[in-house]
Image (cartoon, rainbow, N blue to C red):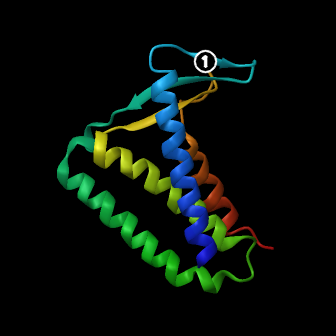
């Protein structure tokens, strides 16, 4: 359980710091990182993010996921890195939820050119969920 809290907190902090850096340094320009990808600040605004009731539901869903993860973290002993992986997914979800609650948008900044712009939280959510149920 401690591993889940530590990994989730680490992802949340890293995500928020990276989003802040992208806001500061890539708000008005695109930063090319070799020939791999671009860093550009993009706000992902969905109309649902501006509805107070929808934001409340998102918060309740995240809280339910957190409580559920706390309850099942110990029962995933036979799976590869499950508490850490659950923490990755929850920390990533918390990072995007924090943006939605504060800004009514999600801050994205990694642009591969051929894929929609995304952020560290998005990667953590997908990787965390994939690793959670990967057998050891």
Is residue 82 left or right of 125 when viewed as pictured?
right
Left or right: residue 74 versus residue 57 is right
Q: 2 above or below 57?
A: below
**Residue at left offset 60%, top offset 52%:** 124
Element at badge 1? Answer: strand
* Above or below: residue 104 compared with residue 7: above
Q: Name the residue under label 1.
A: 31
- Considering every residue shown, the one lying at the far left of the view is 52
Q: Nearer the viewer, residue 112 or 95?
A: 95
Quadrant that contains the C terminus: bottom right
Q: Nearer the viewer, residue 46 or 33?
A: 33
Indicate the quadrant containing the N terminus: top left, top right, bottom left or bottom right.
bottom right
Q: Residue at x 44, y 56 (%)?
A: 94
Q: Residue 116 in the image: x percent, y percent?
A: 54, 30
Q: For residue 134, which quarter of the picture?
A: bottom right
Q: Residue 37's image quarter?
A: top right
């Amino acid at each position: 359980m401690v591993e889940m809290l530590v990994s989730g907190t680490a992802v949340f902090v890293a995500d928020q710091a990276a989003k802040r850096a992208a806001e500061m340094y890539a708000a008005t320009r695109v930063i090319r990182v070799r020939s791999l990808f671009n860093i550009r600040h993009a706000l992902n605004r969905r109309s649902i993010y501006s509805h107070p009731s929808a934001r409340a539901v998102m918060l309740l869903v995240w809280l339910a996921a957190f409580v559920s993860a706390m309850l099942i973290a110990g029962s995933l002993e036979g799976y590869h890195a499950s508490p850490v992986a659950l923490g990755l997914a929850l920390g990533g979800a918390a990072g995007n939820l924090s943006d939605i609650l504060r800004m009514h948008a999600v801050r994205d900044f990694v642009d591969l050119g051929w894929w929609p712009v995304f952020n560290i939280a998005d990667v953590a959510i997908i990787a965390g969920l994939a690793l959670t149920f990967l057998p050891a």
